[in-house]
Amino acid sequence: MQPKHPSESRTMMTDMVLPSETNPINNLFGGELLARMDRAGSIAARRHSRRITVTASVNHVAFNQAVPLGSVLTVDAKVSRAFRTSMEVYIDVWMEDRFSGERSKANEAIYTFVAVDENGKPTEVPPLAPETDQEKERYDGALRRKQLSLVLAGKMKADEATELKALFTASAPLPQK
Ligand SMILES: CC(C)(COP(=O)(O)OP(=O)(O)OC[C@H]1O[C@@H](n2cnc3c(N)ncnc32)[C@H](O)[C@@H]1OP(=O)(O)O)[C@@H](O)C(=O)NCCC(=O)NCCS
């Protein structure tokens, strides 16, 4: 299969935070943000694979900043690495200042989607060819994150997670993620 670039899967969704989507202190409900990221990520994975995609795991999500009622949020999703049938999708969430229009990072998350056929059986996806420095950095860390996710899900033995183990050797540089 021909490799694809991350820009080909890029999916941006902008929407406002409405009262029905907030918690009792008028900030965006966490589950609503997860759903928005899941939708954008799923579309990005579909654009890359041109297949039905299902969410396999959600990793590295932290709610560091509250998102108040009325905020304008942009969810920006791109495939960061494709394996055999699974794709890591990196999702950045930006909040727009009401007065200046300036955007600040509100959240980020990493989802894994799997391409499946009509019977739900995993099916192969094209490889990814990263272009920018950030895309290359995210691509390089993706195998380690995949192994961590599989170990936590009980689908891989810790001693088979070669990339993860390499982190704990004395000479390994600290990873970004
Ligand atoms: C995701 C799913 C298709 C994986 O099926 P499976 O029988 O485990 O298939 P495999 O073992 O062949 O795994 C398929 C791929 O998923 C990856 N994968 C599976 N679980 C994973 C996890 N927890 N984290 C990261 N990757 C995972 C595997 O590593 C493999 O990737 P690769 O082919 O690129 O190497 C299956 O578990 C499923 O359908 N789950 C339900 C999905 C769903 O309904 N999501 C919405 C939830 S609300």
Image: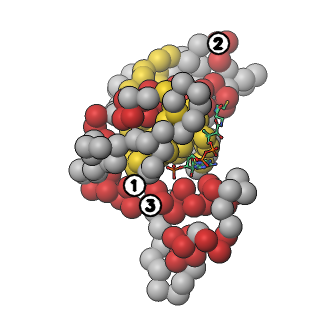
State which quadrant residue 126 falls in: top left
Q: Is mark 1 within 8 Å of ligand 1?
A: no
**Circle 3 sits on which residue?**
141
20 and 87: which is toward the camera: 87
Report the disc number at residue 138: 1
Q: Earlier in the sequence, mark 3 or mark 2?
A: 2
**Is 115 above or below relative to 25?**
below
Q: Earlier in the sequence, mark 1 or mark 2?
A: 2
- Residue 44 in sight: no
Amino acid type shown at disc 2: Pro
Q: CA distance from mark 3 to mark 2?
A: 38 Å
**Circle 2 sits on which residue?**
19
Amino acid type shown at disc 3: Gly
Secondary structure, mark 2, is helix
Q: CA distance from mark 1 to mark 3?
A: 5 Å
State which quadrant residue 44 falls in: top left
State which quarter of the image contains the N terminus: top left
Residue displayed at 63% across by 56% down: 150
